[in-house]
Every structure is written in C-alpha cells, then in structure tokens.
Amino acid sequence: IFGALPPQGEDQIIRLMGQFRADPRPDKVDLGVGVYRNAQGVTPVMRAVQTAEQQLLQSQNTKAYTALAGEQAFRDAMADLVLGPAQDPARLASVATVGGTGAVFMALRLVTMARPDAQVWVSDPTWPNHIPITQHVGLGLKTYRYFDAESRAIDAAAMLADLSQVRPGDVVLLHGCCHNPTGANPQPSDWQALATLLATKGAVPLIDIAYQGFGDGLEADAAATRLIAQTCEEVLIAASCSKNFGVYRERAGVLMVMTPPQLRDTLQGTLTALNRLNYSFPPDHGARLVSMVLTDPALRADWQAELEDMRTGMLHLRETLARELRRLTGSDRFGFLAQHRGMFSRLGATPEQVEKLRADHGIYMVGDSRMNIAGLTKANVSQVAQAIAACNI
Ligand code: PLP
Ligand code: TYF
C-alpha cells in the first residue's frame, strides 16, 4: 500500500538546523530556527521551571493517567495568563494539547467537524506549518495580504480589504503577538478594526499565540487576543508554552474555545473527544510545570523576571543591530529592526542574498530572510551587521 505515498515537502527551518550543525566554520552564526538563546548561545531551562521540576521529582508519587482534557489547574492557569480579565468561564472550553502545534491542529480538526466547507485565511506570509496543517485536515486555504515589503511594516489597509471578503463561518488565523516570520504586528487601532470586521462578518478568529511575553510584555502581548475574545462570539485560541516557559521538548500547549454559553458544554465534550480520538491523554509533565510556576507566587515572580530579562535582551539586540547598520550604511532603512517585536524579523533580502550570507559569511537565516534575533549576541552582532551591509540588502 505504501508505494502510493507521495514524497512530503521538507520543513525548511528544520532542514536549516541540520545544515548549520554540519558547517565546520567556528564563527558561524545561527539565526535560523525559532528557539530562544541567551548571551552564551544556550537555550536555558528557566530557573522557576527548574525549581518546579525539582519539587515535582520530590513530590510526584504516581505517573498514572490524569484527565483526557488535561489537568484543570493547567487549563485554568493558562486561561488566566492568556485571557486575564477577558475570561468568561461560561463561554470557555479548553483542552491541553501537544504543544502549540497540537493546539492549532486540534482547532482546525474541530472546524472540519463543525463546518467542513469553511475556508482558513492565513497571513501572507505566515508560520510555514499553518498551510500544510490546513491542507492536511482538508480545509480550503485563502491568504490575506499582511506585510509591506518596502517598509517592512504591516499593510493594514490591504489586510482589512482582503478580510472583508471572508464568508460567515470562515476561519481567520491571526498571530496574537510577535508575528512569525515577519516581526511586524498590527497597531492597537488595526486590531480594533480587525475585531470589528470579523465580528460583523461572522468569521471565526483562530489566534495562534506562541510568544506571549517576548514582545511588549505579558499583558501587552495578550491585549489583542483579549480584545478579540470580547468582541467575537466564537473564537479559537491556540497557546504554546514552548517559548515563554522554555519547555520546547515537553510539548505543552492549550486550545481554548470561546463560544456562546449554551454551546459551552458541547464544545468541552467535543474537545475532550478530540484528544481521546487522537492520542487519549495529552502530555502532562510540561503542563504540570507550567501550572506549578503560574500558581506559586514565588515561582511566578521569578519566571516573570527571567522572561522580562529575555524580552528586554532581545529588544536591546534589535536596537544594537539597527544602530550598527545605520552607522555602516549611513541610512535609516534598517530602522524596522527596532520596531519589530518578538524573536523574528524579516530582513527583506532576496534568496540569493540569504545564500550569500550563508556561503560567504556563515550567517544562517531562513530562505525568506527571517532572522532569529535571539541568535545575535554582543560578540556577533557587528559581524552580522557588516555581512548584511556587505550584501547590499
Ligand atoms: N505557532 C507559531 C506561530 C510558532 O512560531 C510556533 C513555533 O514553535 C508554534 C505555533 C508551535 O509551537 P510548539 O513548539 O509549542 O508546537
Ligand atoms: O518558526 C520556528 O522556527 C519555530 C520552531 O515545524 C518550529 O516555530 C519550526 C518548524 C516546525 C516546528 C517548530
């Protein structure tokens, strides 16, 4: 039977990881895969997560199954973190998932059960996984304009014009903050216009929030999600704990669905069934660490402090790179680097220039010229700036 299987496209980001590892040059710089790294180039286990893990090792006396929907404490803590004052238990159903990717997948699977002819609108560009997952579950795909290649900011008018064509029941995938891959984000007034448009059209926002705390802070980064949760009747929220808790390989995430109160119990039952049908119980270890950190005041304070240091460190690297490029090029055209938020910026280089950066300078970024700002360090930032300037981007 397997002879009929077509070859699968490779994930370009994962492919780049292997290419970087195989490069023997000692001064190579990895601005590829979206993993946070500190000044030493290390992706640390966060302090509070490490403490929680030690506590868990001491106190956990069983690894028996937990709950199909995941632990209530985890789902409550995540609803609190993401939705804050916008949460409404009467409207909220949720399940723990296999990371943020699992939450996106489950959200789209849910849509196929509810509305198989819904179209999913994704930003051009978007996180490359969004497109094959949409196709894999069998939903139609549409793109909306998002990024202005000239200014490297968003083109809000084009985005709103394209999204004015959504049909009722269509799904609009939005990055809650820190857009991947561009780093360019809507202004608060754009979010307001977007929320109103989607509510008026009867479209269902699917908010993918994978970087809360990496942009302007935990509360500011959740503001758009909260606004939309309060404006639209039906909302899907896929939240990842991978980045902001540094628990990438534990696979912790949550899917939250906001719905009218009379549908809430049906949604909770459907989400729980989706977990059971796909893999029964969701992974527990990472989710448990997250809920321990969020509910213990001392651990939470320490986590927030470390996350804030990570965020401000990345902002500082953005400013340093923009400043270096201003000095080297005598122009302000890289000012967008300091305006963007999150772990990524799309530099706006051609594929040939990206290849030249890799081949001649040992600087690795994704082919669309997405760079991971957390891959910069005090030691390599001027090397990177010089290479970018030398490539006449
Ligand atoms: N969504 C976006 C926009 C991402 O950048 C990522 C990155 O990892 C994810 C979802 C998935 O996160 P996870 O590793 O938790 O599956
Ligand atoms: O965009 C990134 O680099 C991260 C990591 O299939 C990632 O989101 C990349 C590809 C993938 C899963 C995670």
Image: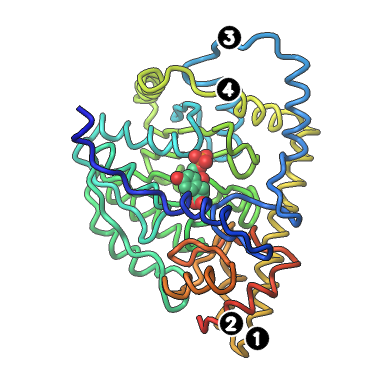
Is the shortest distance between ligand 2 and the CB of mark 2 under 8 Å? no
Q: Amino acid at mark 3?
A: Ala
Depicted 332 relative to depicted 187: above or below:
below
Give the label, 3 or 1, closer to the camera.
1
Residue labelled with disc 2 = 389
Element type where label 4 sits in the image? loop
| Quarter-of-image position of residue 313 | bottom right
Residue 365 relative to residue 247: left or right: left
Residue placed most toward the observer, 13 or 219: 13
Q: Earlier in the sequence, mark 2 or mark 4?
A: 4
Q: Earlier in the sequence, mark 4 or mark 1?
A: 4
Q: Residue at x 77, y 38 (%)?
A: 47
The quarter of the picture where the N terminus appears is top left
Q: Amino acid at mark 4?
A: Asp
Give the label, 2 or 4, closer to the camera.
2
Q: Earlier in the sequence, mark 3 or mark 2?
A: 3
- The residue carrying pointer 1 sits among few (fewer than 14), some (14 to 19) or many (20 or more) residues within 10 Å by Cα, namely some
Depicted 389 relative to depicted 343: above or below:
below
Q: Earlier in the sequence, mark 4 or mark 3?
A: 3
Element type where label 3 sits in the image? loop
Q: Amino acid at mark 1?
A: Leu
Is residue 227 visible in the rendered image? The answer is no
- The residue carrying pointer 3 sits among few (fewer than 14), some (14 to 19) or many (20 or more) residues within 10 Å by Cα, namely few
Residue labelled with disc 1 = 328
In percent of width and height, residue 311 lies at 68, 55
CB atoms of marks 2 and 4 within 8 Å: no
Residue labelled with disc 3 = 64
Residue extending farthest to the front is: 24
Distance (Cα) linking label 1 and label 2: 7 Å
Q: Amino acid at mark 2?
A: Ala
Distance (Cα) linking label 3 and label 2: 57 Å
